[in-house]
Amino acid sequence: MTSRFTIGETDFLLDGAPHRIISGAMHYPRVHPDLWRDRIRKARLMGLNAIETYVAWNAHEPVKGQWREDGDVDLGRFLDIIAEEGMHAIVRPGPYVCAEWHNGGLPTWLTADPSSRSSLRDRMRLRSSDPAYLAEVTAYLEKVNAIVAPRQIDRGGSVILVQIENEYGAYGADKDYLEALIRTTRDGGITVPLTQVDQPIPHMLQGGAHPELHMTGSFGSRIDERLATLREFQPTGPLMCMEFWCGWFDHWGEKHHTTAFADSAADLDRLLAAGASVNIYMVHGGTNFGLTAGANDSGRYLPMVTSYDYDSPISESGDLTEKFHAFREVIAKHAPVPDLPAVDPTEAPTPSAAFESVGDPLGLVAVDRGAVATPPTMDELGSDVVLVEYTTDAAGAGVLEAEVRDYAWVERDGAPVGRLQRGIGDLSLALPDGRALRMLVEETGRVNYDQKIGEAKGLIGPPLLDGTALGGPWQVRTFDVPALGAAVSDVADATPVASGRVAGPVGLRAGFELDEPADLFLDTAGWGKGYAWVNGFFLGRYWRRGPQRTLYVPGPVTRAGRNQVVVVELESMTDATARFLPRPDLGHEVE
């Protein structure tokens, strides 16, 4: 059955009748696809009538020309499930999405050319009407539109709104760029209303405005003031908060952020009482699985943790929180809500097992890139390279200085001498006398907001020894981090870990038993820095820096009987045990 969704003088109109959107954000790549229906259904039980999602370009096309729309990035299936659950969908395809997601959703191949080893960043102006950028964006949007267009509400699907770009007024004001995105979207068969979003701050609303876009706001407090500013710039049509911030994200090395559920519920009540539509950001945050977490840099580089729980009403593992029930009570004052079946809280299984170790795990996935005169950046070495070894001869002692993005382990003649860390501004160390210099550099998350999107990673220029550039030649190796889990699992011989301490880099694996598939919480306390997998599924990064002390294991990746956890530890562990906890530990909470 088809319907018509339009924008009227004061309201959204569904088949000509006033309609208020009560939506929640949920990003399909952050949720295991076998759990999409469960999370969507729980959002509906809270009283929502729509689900909003970003589309992360780099999740669909991490390598140029290798487009994916299956498995965890099957956007069509996600939208179909939303329709099957009786809800509407809002799609925000960017091409830039922010979302605390790796590079703001933009593929790294946009800003580097491995064939010529020359940076394109100065020649391709991101988020602009630059023809080189628009050519790539147009090809991307055509693929997204082909998925979304047949699923619009006027064709019997779920999609009622499509957003152009994202918080563009905080970045630029290129109206030709917005015009090109609108044209490509309409040419791709998108007929539903188009929106834009910015914080209700005059210069941002002006920068992101376009006559063909309905203006919406992003805010989480000062409701009356924000709505008044939005109305000033959007004189007619419905008011909508496209991002009602009900929680917040975490960086490594900071505290775990929460918001008081009563305060958030009161703000939501104020918003709905004003007659506005809303999209709750996030109704369910999910997880930055694998290497998808982003970073911020407003003077200090701060990478995101693996969990994207966001203190959401529906927790990372699908629990209905106090915030869920408080929001549901508020929504019930303004709209009908479904009956809520009783759900008994459960604790996850807590198996544990001793690890066995595999030496030199990085060597299992190493690619020798040969000798070069100048150390190349990661971007020059290929799409989404995150771990690179640079080795050279550098005789003599002195002060080593290097611009690393973002973290480096330094060795002298095979012995560790220290670490360089961008996040704390520690970019020099005393290098003892010797000859061979080895630097293992890790990218810990690409900036997802503001002007540093698309910046190069790895070693930026040659390191200096007492102020003199180290001229090489440099031997370079890259490591396929996502392949590490299978590589360590497949090694024929491994050594039992006799004590609780191990020094990395080291591969670790352990088998454990489950009676049936179940969500799990892998305990990373006592571990250093590295990556973890369960049954080949890449859970993501862990780091002693915290606040996160467990990694969420989605139930669908486990099985009854024998299971396996694989860890690649890059530093050291004080408690080398595979242990699972009954509940998540995301760190000390701070409101």
Image: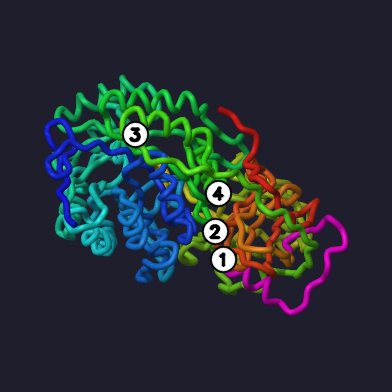
Q: Earlier in the sequence, mark 1 or mark 2?
A: 2
Residue 155: tell me if it is visible: yes
Q: Earlier in the sequence, mark 2 or mark 4?
A: 2
Q: Earlier in the sequence, mark 2 or mark 3?
A: 3
96 on left or right of 398: left
Q: Earlier in the sequence, mark 4 or mark 3?
A: 3
Q: Which residue is mark 4?
A: 317
Residue 476: image x %, image y %? Answer: 59, 68
Q: Quadrant of residue 352?
A: bottom right
Q: Quadrant of residue 197?
A: top left
As rendered, which of 221 and 556 lies closer to the eye?
A: 556
Q: Which residue is mark 2?
A: 290
As rendered, which of 366 and 375 lies closer to the eye?
A: 366
Q: Earlier in the sequence, mark 1 or mark 4?
A: 4
Q: Which residue does the image show at 35% across and 60% down from the upper left?
A: 75
Q: Kindly state the secondary structure of the residue where label 2 is placed.
A: loop
User: For the residues marked 2 and 4, what is the alpha-carbon distance in whole angstroms?
Assistant: 17 Å
On whether residue 496 falls in the magenta region, the answer is yes
